[in-house]
Image (spheres, rainbow, N blue to C red):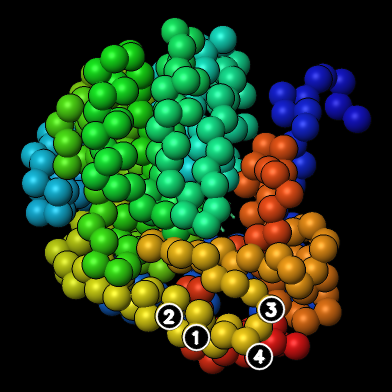
């Protein structure tokens, strides 16, 4: 036992590590933790290799390779119509999770509160608590998981420092609507709030929905840290590379922390991505590819004892097993892994208290069709 008190006394291993480990142990198909089972673009791999051969192997600029930041600014102008100052507003980070943590650390002081919608990606709450602040929870209800704005307005008070939004949303696949944007705008007009916008799944969007990035709205961007992940966009979650975008004054504070926490990110991938970002199809076609995987899996699951909930983005879809089994999500997920050899993630893990008794599990469908089909076959059992 360590001789000091834990900073996170109630936290154990994340559900993603737990289920992936169990999947390995039982040789199960892993539809739990979110990552593709197929190879990333070989051209991008070659560009990294070339970057290393060319000698790009020393510390990069602390804020990120300048050409990469310039290319990110061009991409943002192309996609969202917003002109950014690449020197002052963009910082390359070791992944999206780190960007979110650094943003929260930049703004939070002990006693502050942060509005968190549940179900929520599991790093948000520990990140808030490590900064001495407290989460204030607003529950989203299945099957649509729309934001109950009247509850948000009731929860905001003078201690509320920030709100975290995530679109497309993990685990539900819900995407922000025009009405959500209207509400966010009036919220920050009324209260001195900052927004952490987790947009790591920006390109994984379906059904002709448009990604309503907060980068589109100058009044929202003026108060936001918007966080992205190259791992999600280029099928390389193991690269752990992403970036944050914020107004210049907020970014100054973000960088004060970043320079002492990691200083700079892996250079070769940054050099490669600066070139690869020119190839727009690589990210523009991603939504369509992922939508066809969602549809394929959903079709394969017809007749299995699971009912699909709507998912308009991310590479996740939630399925209800109510009526079929009485056990909790975590018990069912473990049993499916051990007995049917298909790993999933219980949605209860995305609530600080397990949520209301919800019999819903999340499947990750960024897999090849043979694997999705085999998983569905096993789940029909
Ligand atoms: N936010 C959400 C909602 C995610 O699902 C993930 C995936 N891990 C991240 C952030 C972080 O991505 P990264 O691996 O780049 O840290
Ligand atoms: N974002 C991934 C998921 O939701 C997992 C990331 C992680 O393992 N921390 O499955």
Q: Earlier in the sequence, mark 4 or mark 1?
A: 1
Relative to 49, say whether 198 is above or below. Answer: above
In this figure, which residue is indicated by the disc labeled 4? Answer: 377
Give the CA distance from mark 3 to mark 2: 17 Å
**Could you tell which of marks 1 and 3 lies nearer the N-terminus?**
1
Q: Secondary structure at mark 3?
A: loop
For the residues labelled 1 and 3, say whether their Cβ atoms are less than 8 Å apart.
no
Q: Are marks 4 and 1 in contact (CB under 8 Å)?
A: no
Residue lying at 33% horizontally and 14% vertically, measured from the top left: 191
Report, in whole angstroms, how far the alpha carbon at label 2 lies from the one at label 1. Answer: 6 Å
Q: Nearer the viewer, mark 4 or mark 3?
A: 3
**Relative depth, front residue between 278 and 353:** 353
Residue beneath disc 1: 299
Secondary structure at numbered mark 2: helix
Within 10 Å of the Cα at label 4, are there few (<14), some (14-19), or many (20+) other Cα atoms?
some
The answer to whether mark 4 is within 8 Å of ligand 2 is no
State if disc 1 and disc 2 touch (CB < 8 Å): yes
Gap between marks 4 and 2, in whole Å?
16 Å
- Left or right: 309 with respect to 6? left
- Residue in view at x 31 percent, y 55 percent: 202
Residue on which the image places disc 3: 305
Residue depicted at x 14% and y 64%: 278
* Viewer-side residue, 87 vs 184: 184
Q: Secondary structure at mark 1?
A: helix
Cα separation, mark 4 vs mark 3, equals 12 Å
Among numbered discs 3 and 2, the one appearing first in the sequence? 2
Tell me, for residue 295, which label it has, or none.
Answer: 2
Crowding near the residue tagged with mark 2, few <14, some 14–19, many ≥20 C-alpha atoms within 10 Å: few
Q: Residues within 10 Å of mark 1 (few under 14, many from 20)?
A: few
Q: Position of residue 354 (x, y in %)?
A: 72, 44
């Amino acid at each position: 036992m360590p001789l000091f008190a834990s900073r996170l006394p109630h936290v154990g291993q994340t559900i993603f590590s737990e289920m992936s480990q169990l999947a390995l142990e039982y040789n199960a198909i892993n539809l739990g933790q979110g990552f593709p089972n197929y190879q990333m673009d070989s051209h991008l791999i070659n560009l990294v290799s070339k970057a290393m051969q060319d000698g790009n192997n020393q510390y990069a600029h602390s804020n990120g390779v300048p050409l990469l930041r310039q290319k990110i600014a061009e991409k943002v102008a192309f996609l969202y119509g917003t002109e950014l100052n690449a020197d002052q507003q963009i910082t390359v980070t070791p992944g999206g999770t780190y960007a979110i943590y650094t943003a929260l650390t930049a703004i939070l002081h002990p006693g502050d509160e942060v509005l968190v919608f549940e179900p929520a990606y599991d790093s948000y709450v520990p990140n808030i608590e490590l900064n001495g602040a407290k989460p204030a929870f607003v529950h989203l209800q299945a099957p649509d998981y729309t934001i109950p704005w009247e509850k948000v307005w009731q929860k905001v008070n003078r201690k509320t420092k920030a709100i975290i939004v995530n679109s497309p949303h993990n685990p539900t696949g819900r995407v922000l609507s025009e009405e959500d944007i209207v509400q966010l705008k009036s919220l920050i007009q009324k209260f001195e709030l900052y927004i952490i916008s987790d947009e790591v799944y920006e390109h994984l969007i379906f059904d002709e929905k448009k990604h309503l990035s907060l980068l589109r709205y100058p009044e929202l961007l003026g108060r936001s840290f918007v966080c992205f992940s190259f791992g999600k966009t280029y099928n390389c979650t193991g690269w752990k590379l992403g970036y944050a975008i914020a107004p210049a004054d907020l970014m100054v504070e973000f960088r004060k922390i970043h320079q002492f926490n990691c200083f700079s990110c892996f250079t070769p991938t940054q050099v490669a991505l600066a070139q690869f970002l020119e190839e727009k199809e690589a990210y523009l076609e991603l939504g369509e590819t992922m939508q066809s995987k969602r549809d394929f899996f959903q079709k394969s699951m017809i007749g299995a004892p699971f009912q699909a909930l709507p998912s308009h983005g991310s590479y996740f879809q939630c399925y209800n097993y109510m009526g079929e089994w009485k056990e909790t999500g975590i018990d069912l997920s473990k049993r499916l892994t051990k007995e049917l050899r298909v790993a999933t993630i219980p949605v209860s893990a995305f609530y600080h208290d397990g949520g209301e008794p919800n019999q819903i599990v999340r499947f990750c469908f960024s897999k090849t069709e043979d694997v999705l089909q085999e998983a569905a076959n096993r789940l029909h059992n």
